[in-house]
């Protein structure tokens, strides 16, 4: 599935690192940024998630809730979040069901490809950016301008 700007963002429920359920549709009324990434503790993923932590406070200043999403378990997410002092929640998509909904599941590698999705406060896809390969970081420079 390919995401189109303006389409309803596919709804989902996943658990965060604290075992709490997070349902996208329950966040309607506020913008959300979904940061799909392959794996906790891998070099580039750590760099990207720490970059979101350090460099993109403007996303939160605009009212966005940020979620990192990967196939790692809630336990791995808890350890990763603590070790890297990450402020936003990390959601566990162990079977890749949500990554599949968003068209970023890599079946061969059994991981999510790097995709960032801005979901506007009305629940529609406002912006996406992804890297060409999982060996490249995404360009997040335009994300803030699409948060509303």
Image: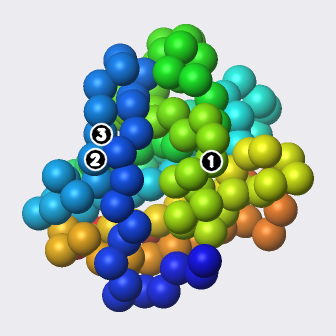
- Residue 109 visible? The answer is yes
Question: Residue 22: which disc?
Answer: 3
103 vs 144, left or right, is: right
29 vs 6, left or right, is: left
The residue at which mark 2 appears reads as 23
Task: Specify the quadrant that holds the N terminus.
Answer: bottom right
| Mark 2, other Cα within 10 Å: few <14 / some 14–19 / many ≥20 | few
- Disc 1 and disc 2: Cα gap in Å? 16 Å
Residue at point 22%, 58% (across, down): 25
49 vs 108, left or right, is: left
Secondary element at tag 1: loop
What colour scheme was applied to this rendering of the protein?
A: rainbow
Q: In this view, does 128 lie above or below 33?
A: below
Q: In this view, does 4 lie above or below 127?
A: below
The residue at which mark 1 appears reads as 96
**How far across and how far down the image is residue 38, in percent?**
71, 43
Residue at point 44%, 77% (across, down): 127
Q: Is residue 132 above or below residue 19?
A: below
Foreground residue among 102 and 113: 102
């Amino acid at each position: 599935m390919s995401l189109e700007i303006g389409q309803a963002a596919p709804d989902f429920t996943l658990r965060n690192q604290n075992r709490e359920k997070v349902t996208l549709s329950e966040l309607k009324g506020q913008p959300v940024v979904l940061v799909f990434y392959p794996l906790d503790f891998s070099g580039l993923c750590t760099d990207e998630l720490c970059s979101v932590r350090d460099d993109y406070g403007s996303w939160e200043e605009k009212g966005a809730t940020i979620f990192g999403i990967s196939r790692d378990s809630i336990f791995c997410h808890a350890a990763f979040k603590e070790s890297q002092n990450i402020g936003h929640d990390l959601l566990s998509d162990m079977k890749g069901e949500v990554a599949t909904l968003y068209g970023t599941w890599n079946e061969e590698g059994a991981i999510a490809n790097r995709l960032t999705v801005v979901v506007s406060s009305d629940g529609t896809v406002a912006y996406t950016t992804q890297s060409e390969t999982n060996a490249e970081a995404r360009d997040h420079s335009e994300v803030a301008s699409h948060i509303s």
